[in-house]
Image (spheres, grey):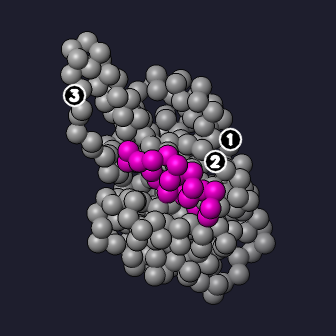
Amino acid sequence: MNGRDFRNALHSGKYVYGMMQVSRSPKFAESVSSLGMDYIFIDSEHIDIDRTTLAWMCHTYSAMGIAPIVRIPEPDPYQASTVIDGGADGVIFPYVESVEEVKALVGAVKYKPLKGQRLHNALDCKEELEPELKDYLEKANQSRSVIVNIESVPAMEALDDILAVPGLDAILIGPHDLSCSLGIPEKYTDPRFDAAVREILSKARKAGIGAGIHVHYDGDIAQEIAWCRETGANFVVHHSDFLSFTLAMRRDLAALKEGIEGRADRAEKGDLNI
């Protein structure tokens, strides 16, 4: 799936499947290519990835027909422009809570390379761009997606206005931060958390915006399926390479210890809260 197909799928309601990658090993891309993923979510917010490595990762996945989507460390338009220059098809912006932030982010991704006062005027509908320039910007940026993390109560309160910003392509719930903002840290089966997730996902899909939640904890996959089927959420972000490795090794080591030594040793559960 290329960037344009990915963006169109978000709006149409078509399901897109992927995972977060934190590994920088070139060998990992070969494994991902055999899984049938539509996109790869590369995290540079919590993981230290230099600009050159990130660009190589983006171009590698693009060449493999897997859309590279990058989360940057903060909702900063200039950082967004940097990862777009490096080959990202979409940008995920963490902890967004206001319309003003979303407008600036749309400007960085959808109006690139326009900057400064002319960009601000265009975003605020104070200036009509010349037809030639408008056509140029639309064609240049047609394959790029703007995705914002909704992960706080203030973001939920501003959600209707956020979803109305032209140029927004999807929202992605950050479950760990959202649960903390709700005052129920890591209680992902709590009815209050479930209600908040359903409200966010349903509103986004009704607005024609892609919607998803990054399930990065060891939870019941049935819950993840139910959220998608019952709210229309179509941006499926399941686990990460690190978490999948942890869960598989925890399971296998427990089985080995029990089978070899006859002891049912169980490791402590732990989440990768990114």
Q: Contact, CB < 8 Å: mark 3 with mark 1?
A: no
The residue carrying mark 3 is 265
Give whichever of 65, 50 is nearer the camera: 65
Start-end of magenta stretch: 210-231
The residue carrying mark 2 is 16
Comes first in the chain, label 3 or label 2: 2
Position of 124 relative to 51 (above/below): below
Q: Quadrant of residue 93?
A: bottom left
Residue 128: image location, x then y, percent: 71, 81
The residue carrying mark 1 is 1
Task: Give the residue displayed 60% in from the left and 37% down from the top.
Answer: 37
Q: Is residue 91 left or right of residue 184?
A: right
Task: Give the residue displayed 62% in from the left and 62% down from the top.
Answer: 230
Comes first in the chain, label 2 or label 1: 1
Position of 3 relative to 258 (above/below): below
Q: Residues within 10 Å of mark 2 (few under 14, many from 20)?
A: many
Q: In front of the other: label 3 or label 1?
A: 3
Q: Contact, CB < 8 Å: mark 2 with mark 1?
A: yes
Secondary structure of the residue carrying tag 1 is: loop
Q: Amino acid at mark 1?
A: Met
Residue 16: image location, x then y, percent: 64, 48
Q: In front of the other: label 2 or label 1?
A: 2
Instruction: Quote the CA–CA distance across marks 2 and 1.
Output: 9 Å
Q: Amino acid at mark 3?
A: Asp
Task: Give the residue displayed 28% in from the left and 25% down from the top.
Answer: 254
For the image, the number of numbered tags is: 3
Residue 6: image location, x then y, percent: 67, 50
Q: Residues within 10 Å of mark 3 (few under 14, many from 20)?
A: few
Residue 77: image location, x then y, percent: 46, 64
**Is any part of residue 164 visible from this angle?**
yes
Task: Give the residue displayed 61% in from the left and 64% down from the top.
Answer: 231
Position of 183 relative to 86 (above/below): below
